[in-house]
Image (cartoon, grey):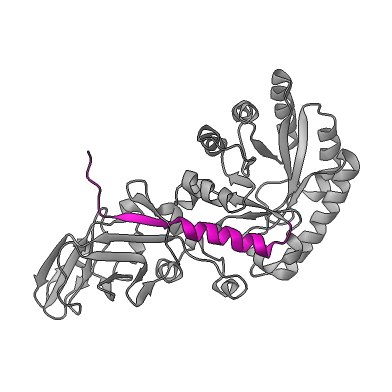
Amino acid sequence: MISTRPTVAEIDLNSIGYNVRQFKHNSSDAELMAVIKADGYGHGAIEVAWEAIKNGATWLGVATAKEGIQLRRAGFKTPILVLGGITPEEIIDCSYNDIDVAVYGKNFIGQLDGYSNIFRKPLNIHLKIDTGMHRIGVLPEDLDAFVKELGNRKYINTRGIFTHFPNAAGDEEFSNQQLAEFADCVNLTEKVLGEIPYKHTANSAAAVNLIGSHFNLVRVGLGLYGYHDEIWLGEKLEIRPALTWKTKVTSTREIKLGNRVGYGRTYLVNRDSRIATIPIGYADGYKRILSNNGFVLIKGQRARIAGRVCMDQTMVDITDIPDVVEGDEVVLIGKQGDEEISMYEMCEWADTIPNDILVSIKERVDRTYIHKID
């Protein structure tokens, strides 16, 4: 048996379920797609998917064909959509595994049609419209010719049409322009192809902030895990963070006034001090930018990071926290006693967003799953 490292990401599945129910309630009659790309934003795709479906999700969204196939192999029968691009070779795998794909280029139509003809099996697609993100998608001015080309393909079934907002929480005027343009694109497309079962535009932020974006399917990614794109969105919809990131003290030592700590000797000890070492580093996804900048919680108090975050270990100043010993719990993100280090606070220190922190937590950080009782 391999002993477990004390650095873990604890995932409260009850919070995942609660967040699904909150978005479902907020989205009236729309179905909910749980977006679990990047291993469920670092929370564990399989575990999150089961919890999301149990609480009302009817679709699963992924970024790659491989992620979708892994879900099928895990036993999921729920509709799955690959939101990003796929290669021609992956078309076969998606068709075989009954996975829907996003389509956004004319050349891709021919490739899809060719592979689908081989199998004589319809491939479900969702037509991606670029209304302003300018990443992937058919431009509105190219849509008429694109749809006519699509309508001539026997084994391609257009099950959905969708777009994406670049700033649903911060630029309502532009987002509403996108909605209007999307509605025009839907009308044009349905004149050629007939009624399309699923229309979807809303990501987590739009699901909260743009009620007109719901249509009949909302795609919830970041919100599923308990975070909003902007903190103020929490006033409109309460959701709960599912992740607590923690470790334990592995060493403590006394450091005399005038000494320096860590690589580059960047942390000057300006009094006789105590330093604790914890087994977390940038190889675990703990950002190096937190060097001399962030804090952790020990015994319900804040301890400043002392020196540079190392690959596998980090030092913290515990001078003002009495009686810290090896084995004491250390919270990196989450609550301890009456104190909390929130994801948003860590994002301020690291000059980044919650998505980045979450997907940076590496595989060697064990995930443990709990169901907290409210």
| Residue 90 in the image: above or below residue 207 | above
Quarter assignment of residue 341: bottom left
Give left or right: position of 119 versus 358.
Answer: right
Which residue shows up at 77% across the image and 38% down it? Answer: 158
Which corner quadrant holds the C terminus?
Answer: bottom left
| Residue 164 in the image: above or below residue 94 | below
| Residues shaded magenta | 1-29
**Residue 301: horizontal and vertical position, in percent?**
28, 76
**Residue 311: horizontal and vertical position, in percent?**
27, 53
| Residue 373 in the image: above or below residue 85 | below
**Residue 26: horizontal and vertical position, in percent?**
67, 65
Which residue shows up at 65% across the image and 66% down it? Answer: 208
203 is within the stretch colored magenta: no
Which residue shows up at 71% across the image and 66% down it? Answer: 210
Quarter assignment of residue 230: bottom right
For this orientation, the residue located farthest to the front is 373
Give left or right: position of 347 versus 239.
Answer: left
